[in-house]
């Protein structure tokens, strides 16, 4: 009798464990909050895309795709917001690692603990995030524009050759104080600051651009420039903020 009860309890324990595991596996990473246009989801367990709908949960292994003249707003479990612009695609590898496949995507990520920090992998870099607001764009070129906070940018292969353009304020101050060295400074201004790094931090109000970004998995040297955010990019941030109600 004791053996029988032991078997019953053991079987029930396995059943409960399986149910709990199933619940964990099917917990959504994000929920689709708003769709303007046409969007589809390629589920992890299938080979056929289906039409995305508001309220749909996105699971580990799913891919979200936007089409022309489309914007999709999704909300993560910690209330972070992500917006896919038209012709964009985002793959949810797991709840802390996303793959930015193509297009322009806006990220507003709430502050996180180090162990729960989010990584966004792009074709030209890996972005480490603990809480910030930024836009990533990828077509033939790549671009990361940071509005708030701090992000880490990591190379996919060899070192970046990073050029940082000087600000207009630096230029005017130097011109005023050292007119006799104007030509030398002008040449330096055009070249900018150059460093060789495997990874670096991107600060607020800065944008970096990668030429031939689709080749960065092999080599990204001599292809990365950093400068201040332009008024046009600032307008992009405003339009995304309006969509999330800020």
Image (spheres, rainbow, N blue to C red):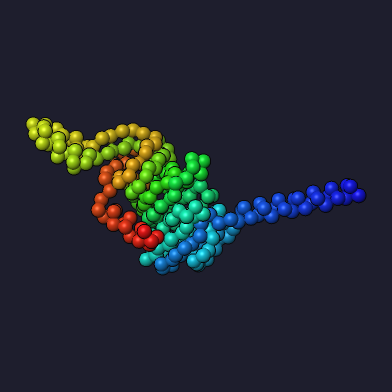
Q: Is residue 71 above or below residue 207?
A: below
Whether residue 123 is visible: no
Q: Residue lying farthest right?
A: 1
Q: Residue at x 41, y 68 (%)?
A: 37
Where is residue 41 shown, x and y percent of the image? 51, 62
- Which of 233/100 is in front? 233
Where is residue 219 shown, x and y percent of the image? 38, 39
- Quarter of the figure with residue 81: bottom left
97 displayed left or right of 206 = right
Q: Residue at x 91, y 49 (%)?
A: 1
10 displayed left or right of 85 = right
Whether residue 43 is visible: yes
- Which of 62/219 is in front? 62
Where is residue 206 shown, x and y percent of the image? 30, 45
Instruction: Tell me the quadrant of the picture where the C terminus can be found.
Output: bottom left
Q: Residue at x 27, y 43 (%)?
A: 227
Q: Is residue 117 above or below residue 74?
A: above
Q: Residue at x 37, y 37 (%)?
A: 200
Where is residue 144 shown, x and y percent of the image? 35, 48
């Amino acid at each position: 009798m004791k053996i029988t009860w032991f078997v019953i309890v053991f079987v029930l324990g396995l059943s409960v464990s399986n149910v709990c595991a199933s619940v964990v596996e099917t917990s959504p990473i994000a929920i689709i909050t708003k769709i303007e246009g046409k969007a589809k989801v390629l589920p992890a367990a299938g080979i056929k895309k289906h039409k995305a709908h508001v309220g749909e949960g996105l699971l580990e292994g799913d891919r979200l795709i936007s089409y022309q003249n489309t914007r999709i707003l999704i909300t993560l479990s910690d209330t972070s917001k992500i917006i896919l612009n038209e012709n964009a695609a985002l793959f949810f590898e797991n709840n802390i690692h996303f793959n930015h496949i193509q297009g322009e995507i806006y990220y507003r990520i709430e502050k996180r603990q180090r162990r729960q920090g989010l990584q966004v992998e792009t074709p030209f870099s890996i972005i480490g995030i603990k809480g910030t607001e930024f836009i990533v764009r990828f077509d033939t070129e790549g671009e990361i524009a940071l509005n708030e906070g701090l992000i880490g940018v990591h190379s996919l292969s060899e070192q970046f050759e990073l050029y940082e353009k000087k600000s207009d304020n630096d230029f005017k101050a130097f011109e005023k104080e050292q007119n006799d060295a104007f030509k030398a400074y002008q040449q330096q201004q055009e070249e900018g600051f150059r460093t060789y790094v495997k990874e670096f931090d991107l600060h607020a109000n800065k944008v970096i651009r990668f030429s031939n970004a689709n080749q960065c998995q092999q080599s990204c040297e001599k292809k990365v420039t950093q400068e201040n955010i332009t008024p046009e990019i600032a307008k992009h941030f405003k339009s995304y903020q309006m969509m999330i109600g800020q």
